[in-house]
Amino acid sequence: MSRTALLVLTLFACNDDSAGSPVSAGTPAGEPGTHVLVVGAGAAGLTVARALDAAGVSVTVLEARDRIGGRTWTVDVGDARVDLGASWAHGTEGNPMTDFAEANGLAWTADETPWSRLYDEYSGSALGGPAWRLMTAALVGFAAALPGLKARYGDTTVDVARDDYLVATGYTGQDARLTQHAIDQWMVELSYAAPVDKKGLIGFWEEESLGGGNQFPVGGYGGWIDAIAEGLDIELGVPVTAVRHGKEGVEVDAGGKTWTGTHVVVTVPVGVLRAGSIHFQPELSAERQAALARLDMGNLEKVVLGWDEAWWDGSLEFVDADVSGVFPEFYDMSEPAGAPTLVGLYGGRFSRAVQAQWTDEEIVAGALDVLATAWGREIPPPAHTAVTHWTTDPFAGGSYVFLPAGASREDLETLAEPESERLLFAGEGTSPDYYGNVHGAVMTGLREARRLGVERFEVEGWEEW
């Protein structure tokens, strides 16, 4: 739901009788005996819990991990402070996440990552401005060609349309490789985290976006997560295995204990729901199960490499000889991380293969091999490393949701609907407009707090939401 729509709902709902209360009479939030269980302490779960708690509603958050934050996770890698999960705020205008940050003294800084090197492995050469311009033109050109390609091919995968576009350009050799890399990596495997031969063409590159540019949270997402979680009742290390809901209330089995409440908001990732590790009774509707079966999780992963001194000069774009996405980008994160740090990002096809077969040592070695090839020199061993495994994480099942061929926005809308008056859902995978984004997760948390009867948010930064 957009910010404007939420504001309209707020104004419509207000009346003289309820103006003094943040909750609506006759709703769950307006009943003194209401106790809401929130499954998951990620951005969505913490948001709905914070909004309910601030309105005077009793809430308990149940989190499987021994930490809060979900797919946001800020850690120290040597002297660097690095986000292993979400790293950016993709737009600050009309964003409840950045509104909360500003109101609570948390800062953001614009992503001004310096890109100094573009290396083509096939030709064995570092390329300059013309190659960068060609790739940028490929992104713009393919985006402009998409309406016609969608009309021609319908419900297929992006690689089919990409092949058509490559033929139409007449490019060969290096120009064709660079164009394919720009489409496959910039537009698909590093954006949607999906394999280009799985990502559906219908709806591709049509998502809503926010103004304000990409921003890094100063000090990482951890500060934002800690601030929004402050004062909440959160139980850690209690994986949820069963959710029972009926006319009289809800029961949640977690960590060897049964928790009772009046309502439950499930905010776990789509990957967890698809895995079936939580048993629902009654079972989820056929419509929800069908939507989950059509959706999939992307596989964006990171390898963090830290040194005592920087030996490089900016970020790297790497076009491997097979154009298959082998460690395609290394961000120079030294400034936001606070110490000399390169963060390698890889997703889609290459990521799925790596996560299924490679050890951490092999991932680090493979990343160093790419760096050595691109810079044409021996790379000093890093002093500190970290490797992510969102793909195989049982509490994530991937990085974030994407729509394969056969799936549609309507599947996300299905997931956004309550299963019953006592079982509700939130999370980025229930956001038709902003799936795959932290602000999408936050917006769904606010949505479910409203659904339960919170009429006015009593949280600094969210007063206008």
Image (cartoon, rainbow, N blue to C red):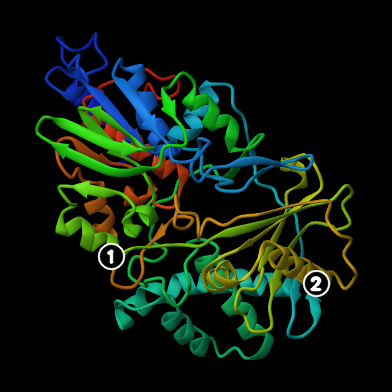
| Residue 452 against residue 444 in the figure, above or below | above
Which image quadrant for residue 404? bottom left
Q: Which label was assigned to residue 374?
A: 2
**What is the x, y in percent for residue 118?**
74, 70
Residue 100 visible within the image: yes
Residue reaching furthest left? Answer: 247
Asked whether, in this view, residue 406 is left or right of residue 232, the answer is: left
- Whichever of callouts 1 and 2 sits on the residue coming sooner in the sequence is 1
**Foreground of the two, 112 or 375:** 375
- Identify the residue shown where x is 65% and y is 34%: 218
Asked whether the residues under the numbered discs 1 and 2 touch, taking CB atoms below 8 Å apart as contact, a structural biologist would say no
Q: CA distance from mark 1 to mark 2?
A: 40 Å
| Residue 379 against residue 323 in the figure, above or below | above
Q: Amino acid at mark 1?
A: Ala
**Foreground of the two, 275 or 377:** 275
Q: Secondary structure at mark 2?
A: helix
- Identify the residue shown where x is 67% and y is 70%: 133
Q: Which label was assigned to residue 337?
A: none
Residue reaching furthest front? Answer: 256
Which image quadrant for residue 177? bottom right
Q: Amino acid at mark 2?
A: Ala
**What is the x, y in percent for residue 161?**
42, 81
Q: Secondary structure at mark 1?
A: helix
Q: Which label was assigned to residue 293?
A: 1
**What is the x, y in percent for residue 333?**
73, 49
